Image (cartoon, rainbow, N blue to C red):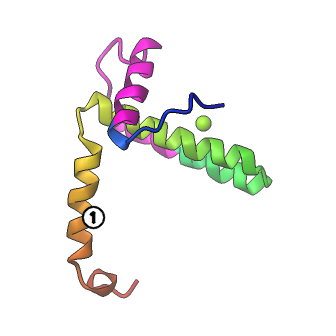
Amino acid sequence: MTDGKKRGLQDYAELCHQIARDKGFWDSPRNTAEMLMLVVSELSEALEADRRGDADGFREEIADTFIRLFDLCGGFEIDIEAEIEKKRLKNQARPYKHGKKY
Ligand SMILES: [Mg+2]
């Protein structure tokens, strides 16, 4: 189920953060380490879903991972589109395998 709207990354950051605010998750200041670990916990849930062979669950947990990251970006006022573009250009200018073995 979707609302049919096309959104950019920054739109998702603002929307996911607003939803988290509306649900009370920002009523008090957030701890950065906790927020990062909540992202990791969603990746762990994705791993467990994959281990069960639960493809729908796997996709949902990957979505949860992005939602947590978007909330973090919105809450910490990170312009994620600009940051990704800056890093993409930086990576593109780096040597093959970034000069490393793997
Ligand atoms: Mg989850």
* Residue 60 visible in image: yes
Task: Where is residue 97? Give x, y as percent.
Answer: 34, 83
User: Which quadrant is home to the N terminus?
Assistant: top right
Mark 1, residue position: 88
Q: Quadrant of ligand 1?
A: top right
Q: How many marks?
A: 1
For image coordinates 27% across by 64% down, the residue present is 88
Name the main secondary structure of what is drawn in magenta: helix
Q: Is residue 55 left or right of residue 12?
A: right
State which quadrant residue 101 falls in. Answer: bottom left
Q: Is residue 76 above or below residue 41?
A: above
Task: Where is residue 63? Give x, y as percent.
Answer: 56, 42
Q: For this rendering, which residue is in front, 76 or 88?
A: 88
* Residue range highlighted in magenta: 11-40
Q: Is residue 28 magenta?
A: yes
Q: Amino acid at mark 1?
A: Arg
For image coordinates 34% across by 38% down, the residue present is 33
Q: Is residue 46 left or right of residue 13?
A: right
Q: Is residue 88 magenta?
A: no
Task: Where is residue 73? Give x, y as percent.
Answer: 31, 37
Q: Is residue 69 above or below residue 74?
A: below
For image coordinates 32% across by 24% down, the residue present is 30
State which quadrant residue 50 falls in. Answer: bottom right
User: Which quadrant is home to the C terminus?
Assistant: bottom left
Task: Where is residue 86? Give x, y as percent.
Answer: 20, 58
